[in-house]
């Protein structure tokens, strides 16, 4: 249990949490000052920063308590995915036979071909 909280990764997460909480408290304090200075929109931000701090705390907790799947769980997941892919392919082939519209059938075949291609990044071009 101590390695969960004192490993190199965990210490990095602890430092990130402390930095995040300090930044959220400072930003909330700054927004409260601006709100009382006459900027009414800053009241909303003064509430928002503590919410961000709570989300940071939740993220810290989740990162410390995440567990890697065991080899058996990984094998079971892959088998489930393969079974679902086979069922989907069977359903697509049965649906293709039932379609009366040849144009719709051709479009569905095109979509099926696209789903087998490797995924590309669609951002940054």
Image (spheres, helix red, strand yellow):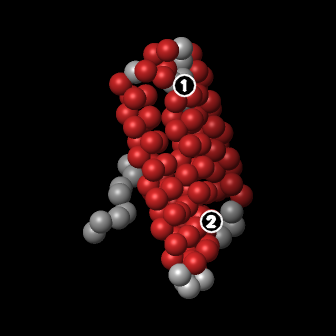
* Residue 70 in the image: above or below residue 47: above
Counting other residues with Cα less than 10 Å from the Cα at mark 2, is it few (<14), some (14-19), or many (20 or more)?
few
Quarter location, residue 102: bottom right
Of 74 and 116, nearer the camera is 74
The residue that disc 1 covers is 67
Quarter location, residue 86: top right
Whole-percent x, y for residue 29 in the image: 51, 63
Q: Residue at x 68, y 47 (%)?
A: 91
Q: Is residue 51 left or right of residue 98?
A: left
Of 66 and 25, nearer the camera is 25
Q: Is residue 44 left or right of residue 111?
A: right
Whole-percent x, y for residue 28 in the image: 53, 63
The disc placed on residue 30 is: none
Of 115 and 92, nearer the camera is 115
Of 29 and 64, nearer the camera is 29
* Residue 112 in the image: above or below residue 72: below
Q: Is residue 78 left or right of residue 6?
A: right
* Residue 104 in the image: above or below residue 38: above
Residue 21 seen by the camera: yes
The residue that disc 2 covers is 47
Q: Residue at x 51, y 77 (%)?
A: 34
Count numbered badges in the picture.
2
- Residue at the farthest bottom position: 38
Please state which of the two labelled residues, at mark 1 or mark 2, is closer to the viewer: 2
- Residue at the farthest left position: 125
Q: Residue at x 46, y 16 (%)?
A: 3
Q: CA distance from mark 1 to mark 2?
A: 33 Å
Q: Quadrant of the N terminus?
A: top right
**Cβ atoms at labels 1 and 2 below 8 Å apart:** no
């Amino acid at each position: 249990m101590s390695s969960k909280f004192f490993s190199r990764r965990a210490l990095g997460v602890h430092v990130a949490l402390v930095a995040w909480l300090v930044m959220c408290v400072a930003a909330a304090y700054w927004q409260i000052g601006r709100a009382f200075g006459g900027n009414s929109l800053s009241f909303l931000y003064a509430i928002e920063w503590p919410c961000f701090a709570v989300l940071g705390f939740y993220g810290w907790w989740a990162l410390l308590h995440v567990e890697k799947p065991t080899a058996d769980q990984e094998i079971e997941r892959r088998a489930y995915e393969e079974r679902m892919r086979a069922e989907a392919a069977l359903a697509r082939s049965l649906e293709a036979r039932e379609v009366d519209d040849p144009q719709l059938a051709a479009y569905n075949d095109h979509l099926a071909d696209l789903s087998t291609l490797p995924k590309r990044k669609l951002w940054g071009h």
